Image (cartoon, helix red, strand yellow):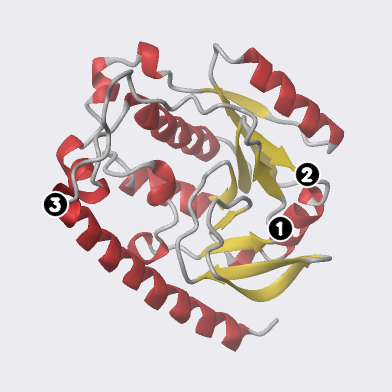
Amino acid sequence: MGGFQTWVINLDRAPQRLARISAQLQALNLPFNRLSAVDAKTMSTAQQALLDDATYRQKHGMSPVLGELGCYLSHVAVMQAFVASDAEFALVLEDDVLLHPQLPAVLQGLQQHAARWDMCKLSAVHSGTPQPVLELAPGCQLAVMLSRCTGSSAYVVNRHAAQTYLQHLLPMSLPYDHVFDQGWRLGLKVRLATPTPCGHDENIASTIVAPPGMQRKFALLQRLPAFRYRLGNELRRVFYGLREWRREQRLGR
């Protein structure tokens, strides 16, 4: 697809997952580049130092695991590779994603309306309370989100978004999918394609797991700072979403 560079994040020790997503991309006629994911099992001391442990615990109310950091650094590495290329846009995929047949048409719509987004999510764990603003492809709308929409298994970014991520996302203080859509903090036009043209394969086990016997989540009182953070964060998300929705209404469909 002209203008788009597709990246698949894949651990070296997960060739079966690579084969699975390779088949999906081939069926959709989407060539891709593989990004060797940062592996928690072989992570360097310098890489581990990119985690702000204290802030993570305060904001998230639980202990971090190195698999989350590996995922986070892998997405950052995609941004570095994308910025170093001459592509206009990057389609970023985790290797457990499910690609639906309408994905190429949605990508064409995003390219056609490139001025209306900096980052657009193509998969979602929560609904995001989408407010549609224009049609990307038959049956799929570009939308502003008013509520939380986690997950980072499929999304597109332009060069401005990638450069902004590289400037602001390190060190890690939250899981990647909790921070990369904070358009109000990053100054980005964050959008959602709805219904999403990609999903998550629930039959594939996550590679982000806690060590045996580890109790990640803190006791209720210890999580109070995280609750305060989340309340403030979600209020900012609503205000941002309403502001972006009003902007889109002025632009028209």
The CA span between labels 2 and 3 is 51 Å
Closer to the chain start, of discs 2 and 3, is: 2
Find residue 111 and name its label: 1
Q: Tag 2: residue type?
A: Met
Residue at image location 73% in from the left, 53% down from the top: 107
Left or right: 62 as drawn, with respect to 13: left
Cβ–Cβ below 8 Å for labels 3 and 1?
no
Find residue 186 and report its image quarter: bottom left
Find residue 1 and name its label: 2
Coordinates of residue 64 in the picture (x, y in percent):
28, 33
Tell me the SS state at disc 1: helix
Find residue 121 and report its image quarter: bottom right
Residue at image location 59% in from the left, 61% down from the top: 192
Query: Mark 2 Cα within 10 Å, few/some/many (few <14, many 20+)?
Result: few
Coordinates of residue 87 in the picture (x, y in percent):
63, 42
Query: Mark 3 Cα within 10 Å, few/some/many (few <14, many 20+)?
Result: few
Cβ–Cβ below 8 Å for labels 2 and 3?
no
Cβ–Cβ below 8 Å for labels 2 and 1?
yes
Residue at image location 32% in from the left, 48% down from the top: 168
| 209, above or below 54, in the image | above
| 206, above or below 196, in the image | above
Q: Tag 3: residue type?
A: Leu
Left or right: 65 as drawn, with respect to 190: left
Coordinates of residue 241 in the picture (x, y in percent):
46, 74
Query: Mark 1 Cα within 10 Å, few/some/many (few <14, many 20+)?
Result: many
Nearer the camera: disc 2 or disc 3 = 3
Residue receiving disc 3: 221
